[in-house]
Amino acid sequence: MMIDSTVVELSRWQFAATALYHFLFVPLTLGLSFLLAAMETIYVTTGRKIYKDMAQFWGKLFLINFAIGVATGLTMEFEFGTNWSFYSSFVGDIFGAPLAIEGLMAFFMESTFVGIMVFGWDRLKRGQHLAVTYLVAVGSNLSALWILIANSFMQTPQGASFNPHTMRMELSSFTDLIFSHDAQAKFVHTSIAGYVTAAIFVCGVSAFYMLRKRHTELARRSFRVAAIFGILATLGVITLGDALGFVGGQAQPTKLAAMEALWKTEQGPMPFNVVAFPSQKDQTNHGELQIPYALSLLVTHSVDGSVPGVDQLEAMAKQRIRNGIPAVQALQTLSKNPEDQTALATFRQHQDDLGYGFLVQGYQHDLSKVTDADVDAAAKATIPPVAPVFWAFRTMVAFGFAMLAFFILAVVFTLRNNVERRRWFLKIAPWMIPVPFIANEAGWLVAELGRQPWTVYGVLPTWMSASTHSVTYMVFSLAGFVLIYSAFIAVEMFLMVRAIRRGPDDHGDHKPSPALTTANAEA
């Protein structure tokens, strides 16, 4: 059954909108949880109350972000069943496992202990409360781990095989699913990006206080902890980003070609396009600014390495499409007669390219009537939209190096104890707060838009993954989600700004002692 292409596109827009909204909250939660643990560790080991005040204040902002993040994230799991029913049926045995573990192991631990962390300061001993804070941090990051394992299966399907009798993907190796190179690299990269986000956030808010000479002791120490934490995290995210790019380039060469706007395969050494203006229609770049040798070094880790371009990838796709057509035709026979051994043998022979046979069905449902033009169109569709992926990748990288420069200055100034005199730098710091959020969203676009036209790369095309809703239903639900999630953003901003303006005194911090109050009254 062919699904209305408009419904598929609206389903994609709805999931993209909810995911992008949700991903505004996730990185800050990941990073703030460990920053809180670091601040409280200093408090427990030194006994200095200022670090307790810091942990309490930033914990309040963590709680606001965590609550809104949970509200925006829960609906996404339901969307798989409502808007992507065929996808859920096709790979539910694999995709559902890490999501279930995330809920049982990580989310419940995180949500259970976050209340104790925020409200248990006067009810628990120092060591006990510190342990709770670390459990919240570990739970937050474990949630990210299992979700990214599920996502990585969509990027590089491992640990599963297709069963022609059940017409579904089935889990064959849980170990391969968990320990895929893409999953591990993506988890570390995403988690550390969250640490960078939180560090920028704490530095920006602390600079706001120092500019206004409010809560200066707390702000100065918070700034120092965040700056040191941030420079280490930024170095990590840049280094591991290179590793993720190397792993992803091996698994998804079409995404790599889009990231680099690489239309023609050339012999190495290959230059890196710093700036280019890709034209998908003409399959060329209108203007380029290049760094010689750099692409070979970055992608292949050798001077003379070669990277396949769009021309080579499309030629390979055509071959796989033609090889996948018999696999789909054999499946159609098996659906009517599961005991047909000839059809089963044909399927086994061509099963590695089954997804490409599905892909061409989006252009000609009757595979016996597929033409060269249909194959060419399907092959061209295997290349994701180049310009958005190209520029999203460069936005992410440019902002990453901008944050590194910021943290280098922040560490130098704070270790010299003169950050408060660098008012020009303090004025920049609050404006840096949106930068990691934009970089995170750009990275998500590279990962997900660069996977197209696949829901599960090379296995299940996006066109056949969606549910058979009406266009009216999808328009209505998309508009509803955008409005509701925009309201969540507004609530988050209002609560965060109000809490920051009130400052840490809401916890009763820095109140004068009774003796000092009496002395002031007598004076």
Image: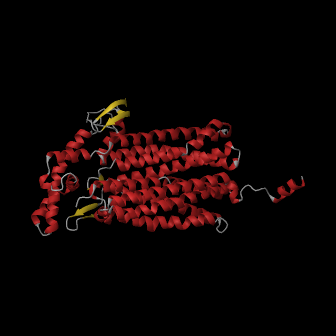
Residue at (14%, 61%) from the top-left corner? Answer: 330
Work out whether residue 43 or residue 50 is closer to the camera in this orientation and state it: 50
Which colouring convention does the figure follow?
secondary structure
Instruction: Using the image, determine if residue 110 lies above or below residue 48.
Output: below
Q: Quadrant of residue 231?
A: top right
What residue is rendered at 15% in x and 60% in y?
347
- In the displayed structure, 249 sits above or below 7; it is above
x and y percentages locating residue 158 in the rendered image: 30, 57
Question: Percent position (x, y) of residue 363?
Answer: 20, 51
Q: Is residue 12 left or right of residue 49?
A: left
Going by the image, does 378 lie left or right of 139?
Answer: left
Q: Is residue 26 left or right of residue 289?
A: right
- Of 16 and 38, nearer the camera is 16
Residue 105 vs 235, above or below: the answer is: below
Q: Whole-percent x and y of residue 211?
A: 67, 42
Which residue ends up furthest to the front in the rendered image?
472
Task: Say which quarter of the image contains residue 99.
Answer: bottom left
Residue occupying the far right of the picture? 522
Residue 444 versus residue 39: which sits nearer the camera? 444
Regarding residue 243, the answer to whether it shows in the image is yes
Q: Position of residue 292 (x, y in %)?
A: 35, 29
Q: Quadrant of the N terminus?
A: bottom left
Q: Residue at x 28, y 44 (%)?
A: 383
Q: Using the rendered image of the protein, determine whether residue 48 is visible from the camera's viewpoint.
A: no
